[in-house]
Amino acid sequence: MRVTLNEFPRLIEERPELLRGCIVDTNAVFAASMPLDRLNTWAEEVFLRFRDYKVPVYSNLNIRSEFIDLHRRVLIPEGLVSLFDATDGDVSLSLELRTQLKLLKSAKKKATEAKKLFKFNDQQLKKFRRLMSVPRLDPSKPIVWESFCKDYFHSYLSRAWDSTLETYGIQFLGTREIESGEHFTKRPSWKDMTDIVGRYGIGSTDAMIVNFFLCSKFSMLVTGDEDVAYVIERLAPDSRYVLVCEDGEDTA
Amino acid sequence: MNQSEPKKEKKTPRELFEEIRRNQKPSPELIDGLKEIKRNEEQKEKDKQPESPERKIARPQTPPDLDL
């Protein structure tokens, strides 16, 4: 059953089992950590509200991995546009790289105007990596792409997850916690995850999170992903809650 | 005297993000690499250009095959 943040105070009085905790999907954790995300304010409010009610929030390995990847897909184009701006009018950019960066800047501007967070797909990422990975005349010098990564996003990426966990009090559920049975009724399995993908056609990462949630004893999951909300509603319409953003628009 | 490492200041994700945006600038090694990519591109362009007529004239002619 879908619920919104406004309904949460009433719901927690009616269903005290929600105090056990909830699982937060990647896009909610990501949105809370990324000021440019459309759901940033909503996600921050969710975490603050949970803290007020002392509801523990949990994440897992899949969520962490997806979180890192989302940051990569956002921070690399951010950095490239920033690099373009820093060198614009300078003679240090090749014509091809300059043209591609100009196109990227324009695409990113359009996305921002449409209130969308600009993210690279794999093809775009590989294109820029190829353009900036030319072998150096002096092999002891770093590949340009690697210098770019170092200057523009490595240090942020390595700190973003820990900072997010610490700021919002997110706890990690690993193998040990699953085995202990404290929060789980059964072990999440590949077979169940594949079954979810097969039945509903959602992505495997989303299916892993849905399966993880359904194997847990938690009654609520927070998500900004329509696929995840839909499948939980289909699989557990009465027993589980999905906390979604009021405007219902998908984030990912 | 024991000198402990200075503790890294704890930052929220927002503060971290703002910090990275503020401090983002290309390092000298990145600029150096970008310049090299540009020089490579220019060299490739030069290599692609057809020879000028003057150079063709200046080049020593190979003797024509003698048809004996």
Image (cartoon, coloured by chain):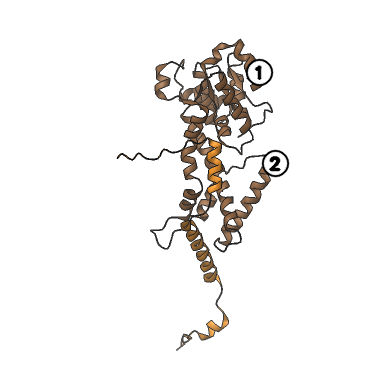
Chain colours: A brown, B orange
Residue at (51% x, 38% y) in the render: A69
Q: Chain of mark 1?
A: A
Q: Amino acid at mark 1?
A: Glu
> Residue lying furthest left in this view?
B1
- Disc on res. A7: 1
Give percent across and percent down for residue B31.
50, 59
Q: Chain of mark 2?
A: A
Give percent across and percent down for residue A155.
47, 44
Residue bearing the label numbered 2: A114
**Label 2, residues with CA under 10 Å away: few <14, some 14-19, many ≥20:** few
- Left or right, A247 with reference to A45: right
* Quarter in which the N terminus of chain B is drawn: top left
> Residue lying furthest front in this view?
B1
Q: How many marks?
A: 2
Residue at (43% x, 25% y) in the render: A174
**Label 1, residues with CA under 10 Å away: few <14, some 14-19, many ≥20:** few
Q: In terms of image quadrants, where is residue A233?
A: top right
Whether label 1 touches label 2, CB < 8 Å: no
Q: In terms of image quadrants, where is residue A91?
A: bottom right
Q: Amino acid at mark 2?
A: Ala
